[in-house]
Image (spheres, rainbow, N blue to C red):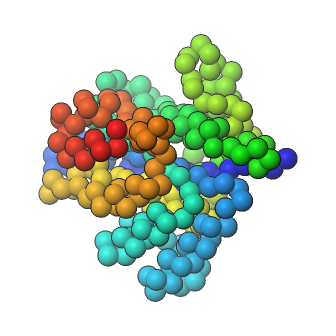
Amino acid sequence: MAASFTVYIDESGDEGFVFHPNENGSSRWLVLSAAVFRKSNDLGAVHLLREVRKKLGKEPKKALHFRDLKHEQRVPYVRAISEVQLRTVSVLIHKPSVKEPEKFQSEKFRLYRYATRLLLERVSWLCRDHHKEGDGDGTAEITFSNRGAMSYDDLRDYLSHLKQSSEAKDIRVDWSVIHPHQVKAVNHDQLAGLQIADAVASGIYFAVNLNPYGEAEDRYLRLLSPTIYRHKKTAVGYGLKFWPEDLDSLSEELPHLAYFQAYK
């Protein structure tokens, strides 16, 4: 039987820990986001990108990169995303709050893999709780935006290791949904779903990351709000997962995060 869901994953920010004044150096945040579609609605991503390109005056097959667009182009893009049948999940890592950054610097892509774990936990809950009987086998096909230097065989091995040690390490992925062999990587420009995941990750990133003038842009977040995965009407901890500190602790240090309180 076919999978029930398709999940597209991309990130915004970097994994560095070299922070300079005025928001220079490494990004303060790493955001990893998933755009989750029912398999039966997967073509909705293609239709969405087709209409957005048309509205923005882009060539029919041109890949969209959110950061390359102007603000006035990004707004209708994320508004269009909010109007289709999908859900989004994002992990928001505030790197200056990581207590022992050397652990994540000692091994390449370790922070990204940990973010993947947190993300797939929540993606699995979303898919498990919204699976319709007879609509596929309940599993999710996972497609990452290809990061050229990263081995996805290693990532699949990492997920397999998590599966084997779930009980001992309080790993909360629902493995009836996530199967490591259903994980792959594809170049960003090849799939509409990956371009949507890029827009989600970048849109959320702009809401948390201060620019050199000390400003954040939360409009993209507000427009994406209808897509964010909620459990019992709560998004924080589900469709919006902050780490390593919780939202309340981070808000004490970073007052611009106050508008996320509406998602609790």
Q: Is residue 71 left or right of residue 64?
A: left
On screen, 196 above or below 161? Answer: below
User: Which residue does the image show at 58% across and 52% down from the upper left?
Assistant: 36
* x, y percent for residue 71: 31, 71
Locate residue 219: give its quadrant. bottom left
Q: Is residue 43 left or right of residue 102?
A: right
Pick the front one: 174 or 95? 174
On screen, 180 above or below 58? Answer: above
Pick the front one: 145 or 230? 230
User: Which residue does the image show at 44% across and 56% down from the upper left?
Assistant: 226
Instruction: Count the labels in the image.
Output: 0
* x, y percent for residue 102: 37, 26
Q: Is residue 169 visible?
A: yes
User: Which residue does the image show at 62% across and 55% down from the upper left?
Assistant: 37
Of all residues, the one furthest to the top in this rendering is 168
User: Which residue does the image show at 49% across and 77% down from the upper left?
Assistant: 52
In which quadrant of the rendered image does the C terminus lie? top left
Q: Is residue 152 visible?
A: no
* x, y percent for residue 184: 68, 49
* x, y percent for residue 109: 50, 38
Q: Is residue 17 left or right of residue 58?
A: left
Locate residue 191: give its quadrant. bottom right
Locate residue 190: give its quadrant. bottom right
